[in-house]
Amino acid sequence: MNCCDTNLPTPVSSNKHTWNSAMFFKRKKEKRPTLAWERLDNNGGPAYTFRTKVPGGWLVATRESHGDGVGSGATFIPDPNHQWNGYSLGQEEREQQEIEQQVPEAPCTKCKKLTNHIVGGQYKCGWCD
């Protein structure tokens, strides 16, 4: 597949959903898939670190250059509600996650997607805000 290929990716099926990336971006009313990268500050770590929201969590990418060459890497951090603020998920976040696991799913007040995440007394999926 090259940059100009117009063929859609093969849908991926799971127990609950069948989707592909084109369907996700169509919902967001974007013409082309776009990742919105946020730069994270580093203290003693890799020279450049970025993160972007992806379904189910965050994609984190790092790049560091030395006289010996360039090193890079990427990892996925599971965080379905995108609560990670750039620091480790602490006790407060874990307690909130436990509460959310006990809360029944209901439609997001904005987009109607099922979620168990509550903000200000309203169900919010985290994708449509």
Image: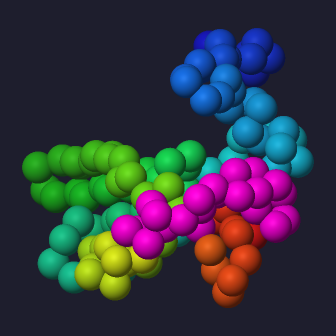
Whole-percent x and y of residue 13?
A: 59, 19
Q: Is residue 85 left or right of residue 15?
A: left
Whole-percent x and y of residue 38?
A: 52, 68
Whole-percent x and y of residue 50?
A: 43, 63
Identify the residue shown where x is 25% and y is 58%.
64
Which residue is most to the left?
68
Residue 8 occupies which quadrant of the picture?
A: top right
Identify the residue shown where x is 82% and y is 67%.
109
Is residue 30 visible in the rendered image? The answer is no
- In this rendering, the answer to whether 56 lies above or below 17 is below
Pick whichever, 76 or 62, lies toward us: 76
Residue 105 is one of the magenta-drawn residues:
yes
Q: Is residue 51 left or right of residue 63?
A: right
- In this rendering, the answer to whether 64 lies above or below 30 is below
Residue 94 is one of the magenta-drawn residues:
no
Identify the residue shown where x is 59% and y is 20%.
12
Q: Which residues are magenta?
A: 97-117
Q: Is residue 101 left or right of residue 37?
A: left
Residue 112 occupies which quadrant of the picture?
A: bottom right
- How many dots with numbers? 0
- In this rendering, the answer to whether 129 lies above or below 17 is below
Residue 122 occupies which quadrant of the picture?
A: bottom right
Q: Quadrant of the N terminus?
A: top right
Q: Quadrant of the C terminus?
A: bottom right
Is residue 63 visible in the rendered image? The answer is yes
Q: Is residue 62 left or right of residue 1?
A: left
- In this rendering, the answer to whether 45 lies above or below 27 is below
Identify the residue shown where x is 50% and y is 48%.
56
Q: What's the image's color scheme?
A: rainbow
Pick whichever, 110 or 39, lies toward us: 110
